Amino acid sequence: MTFLLGALSLGACTPALPPEQAARERAEAYWAAMLVGDYITAYRYEALSTESAADLQGYLTSRGGLQYSRAEVLDVRLVAEDRAEVLVALAYRLPMLGTRDPIEAEAWSDWVLIDGAWYHRPQRGSFWR
């Protein structure tokens, strides 16, 4: 019993991840949700979900018609203590335009630290919204 309690207490003292690694893990989880079209899960990684006026239905409605077939986090750079930029390689289709071949792109996106967790913060007017 003493061993079990000791092991549990050691688990509680696990050091925090470096900020870049924590941001990478959150970005990878966000893009994994986007790839399968699970926008409810993706919403949990959006900075706007932490705001008091957050509107899940509005977010779901604004998702548009992009269909992602690939999203790979290539790089993460910390630009401030509470702000990171994440480079993502994307492949997506615009079904409403009848595109068959995916469009390939690389894009930097902003992530912000809110209450100890990293959140995606799209720029206004960007295709991220």
Image (cartoon, grey):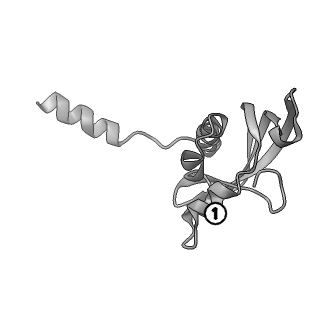
Closest to the observer: 98 or 5? 98
Secondary structure, mark 1, is helix
| Residue 119 visible in the current orientation | yes
> Residue 18: where, in percent of width, then height?
58, 42
Label 1: how many residues lie within 10 Å, few (<14), some (14-19) or many (20+)? few
**Residue ID at (75%, 50%):** 64
Picture layout, residue 44 above or below residue 48: above
> Residue 59: where, in percent of width, then height?
64, 58
Picture layout, residue 17 above or below residue 91: below
**Is residue 129 rendered to the left or right of residue 42?**
right
Circle 1: residue type: Gly
> Residue 99: where, in percent of width, then height?
88, 33
Q: Quadrant of the C terminus?
A: bottom right
| Residue 75 visible in the current orientation | no
**Residue ID at (87%, 31%):** 104
**Residue ID at (57%, 60%):** 56
Number of callouts? 1
Which residue lies most toward the left here?
1
Please give the residue where the numbered disc 1 appears in the rendered image: 58
Res 62 → quadrant: bottom right
Which residue lies most toward the bottom here?
53
**Residue ID at (36%, 42%):** 13
**Is residue 17 rendered to the left or right of residue 88?**
left
Closest to the observer: 8 or 97? 97
Closest to the observer: 92 or 123? 92
> Residue 109: where, in percent of width, then height?
77, 49
Q: Quadrant of the N terminus?
A: top left
Res 58 → quadrant: bottom right
**Is residue 39 rendered to the left or right of residue 85?**
left
